[in-house]
Amino acid sequence: MAIASFSEERFPLRVAFGTSGGPERRTEIVRLSTGFESRNQRHAHAFRRYDAGSGVKSREDLFAVLDFFEARRGKLVGFRFRDPLDHSSAPPGQLATAFDQEIGAGDGAAQVFSLSKRYGLGADAYVRPIAKPVAGTVVVAVDGTALGGGFSVDAATGLVTLAAPPAAGQAVTAGFQFDVPVRFDLDQLVVNLAAFEAGDIPAIPLVEIRPLVEIRPLAEIQP
């Protein structure tokens, strides 16, 4: 039996909208004998962590999460997750437009560009790769003119392919909605209906991943 290491299925939206969590950085700090600090980050990109348990409001939500957990085989298979706070190229409360994010500049030859989202301004800005755009939401502009066609989007990788390469120096911009690639961060889902009805919410940790696209074999499942 073979199974994809990542599923393009999305975690139940009604549960996702109530989850807590956000980006996590790994910063190593060494205090020197002079009193100064040396700080270094282990990863170029933040990894997001969520607790979906806070989004579970009913028995129906519990069963939806249980069904999704089993289909993903616990930690084994990654999946899409809608961050309730940060899921659009546009500022909060605004619709995405083709001019939201610069994703590259033409050189007269390149036709493929990767979606990304910029946080902050100037030289200190952080550029986040976007690998899981929501199909049908991506709009593109070249040199300030929105394209009505002439491009394609791979929703599984975040790659935008233009039918014709932009001229040298022409900015390529895009707007989109996107999901976060995550996996369950546990292999046992502990559910107690009596405790849940008494107000005890189960912990359902999720962690962001960098998804692979290859197919890999599964060992024989033991009963």
Image (spheres, rainbow, N blue to C red):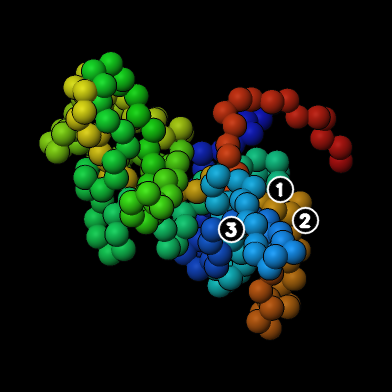
Where is residue 137 drawn, in percent x and y? 30, 43
Position of 60 with respect to 125 (left or right) is right
Residue located at (65% from left, 44% from top): 72
Q: Is residue 42 above or below residue 94?
A: above
Q: Earlier in the sequence, mark 3 or mark 1?
A: 3
Q: Disc 1 designates what residue?
A: 74
Identify the image quadrant of residue 200. bottom right
Judged from the image, the secondary structure of the residue bearing numbered disc 2 is loop
**Residue 188 disc label:** 2
Q: Could you give the CA–CA distance between mark 3 and mark 1, rounded to whole angstroms? A: 22 Å
Regarding residue 67, the answer to whether it shows in the image is: no
Q: Earlier in the sequence, mark 2 or mark 3?
A: 3
**Front tag of 3 and 1:** 3
Position of 151 with respect to 200 (left or right) is left
Q: Is residue 135 above or below residue 92?
A: above
Amino acid identity at mark 1: Gly
Q: Disc 3 designates what residue?
A: 24
Amino acid identity at mark 2: Gln
Identify the image quadrant of residue 85. bottom left
Q: Mark 3 and mark 2 in contact (Cβ < 8 Å)?
A: no
Q: Mark 1 and mark 2 in contact (Cβ < 8 Å)?
A: yes
